[in-house]
Amino acid sequence: MSALIIDGKKIAAGVTERLKNLVSNLPAGEIPGLAVVHVGDDPASAVYVRQKERASREIGIRSYVHKLPESATQDELLRLIDKLNKSAEIDGILVQLPLPGSIDAEKVIAAVLPEKDADGFHPANVGKLWMGDETVEPCTPKGIMALLDSTGVDMSGMEAVVIGRSNIVGKPISAMLLSRHCSVTICHSRTKNLPEVSRRADILVAAIGKPNFVTGGMIKSRAIVIDVGINRVNGKLAGDVEFETASRKASWITPVPGGVGPMTIAMLMSNTIQLAGLIHSERGE
Ligand code: GUN
């Protein structure tokens, strides 16, 4: 039997529509503002920053892109963040990663006011996430939770396996699955017998950045498979999951493109509106 597709493009469009309606009913003085800081020339980052600008425009959020050259110093960047922290026009701040090697990313992330942290990467917000307190949730994991919720499956008590331990996806999605009462295992490049572990998963999240790494043989029958990978192979996009073999084993699966990707931007918009005090942290509400 073939898996049902979790249509991230359609679900993200629904979130966008709801947010657009919400913003369109606000008086001019209450329109949320998002500042996106882009340092250097990473071509993938340039694409992501443009997508964020486009989504802000579509929803009606005020978007401010600050472009700094590759040669920008850490002090220059920290001064800009200080200015944005103090600006009454700005509700959310996002510093696009990766930063040039000369800049200490941890220091920069910690310089953003937790109350304006659109990424949910500030240590105070990360701490709240792990404590199960209400906070601003990182965009990609927040999008993944919305995709899982869209299946209507009760996650409580399920075995979840996350492949990848990044601060952007692997660690926060693990905290969020745990808060929904899953038993969570985090795997990474040093994990022994990874296929044996992944075959235990009722929910499998692949966030490793290796094209087609997860094959059908690594998936439990009827598992829900979430593919976070965005890899370029011969000019084409490929996920971390080998879709053809995986979709024969899974009950639900996200495609690449059109799965997790569109959700990340929709959730950044949701976070910005949340930071402006207009909604609570429910996903996309
Ligand atoms: N680079 C790749 N993903 C992300 C993200 O979610 N936030 C930021 N700031 N940079 C990224």
Image (spheres, helix red, strand yellow):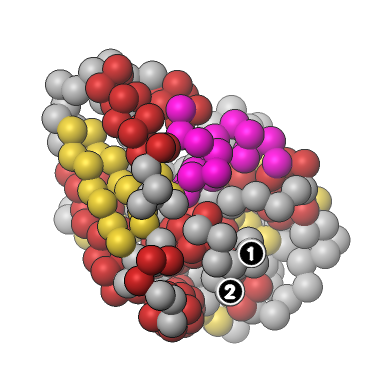
Mark carried by residue 280: 1
Q: Amino acid at mark 2?
A: Glu
Residue 232 image position (x, y, % from top left) = 26, 51
Label 1 residue SS = loop
Cα distance in 3D space between marks 1 and 2? 8 Å
Mark closer to the chain start, 1 or 2: 1
- Residue 132 visible within the image: yes
Q: Nearer the viewer, mark 1 or mark 2?
A: 1
- Residue 185 visible within the image: no
The correct choice, above or below, for 172 with respect to 278 in the image is above
Mark carried by residue 285: 2
Residue 62 image position (x, y, % from top left) = 30, 61
Mark 2, Cα crowd under 10 Å, few <14 / some 14-19 / many 20+, is few
Residue at the spot x=70%, y=41% of the render? 128
Residue nearest the observer in this picture, 106 or 275: 275
Residue at the spot x=33%, y=48% of the render? 35
The correct choice, above or below, for 193 with respect to 181 in the image is above
Q: Judge left or right: residue 69 versus residue 35.
A: left
Mark 1, Cα crowd under 10 Å, few <14 / some 14-19 / many 20+, is some
State the quadrant of the C terminus: bottom right
Q: Judge left or right: residue 63 versus residue 253.
A: left
Q: Which residues are magenta?
A: 111-128
State the quadrant of the N terminus: bottom right
Mark carried by residue 154: none
**Mark 1 in CB contact with mark 2 (< 8 angstroms):** yes
Residue at the spot x=17%, y=55% of the render? 235
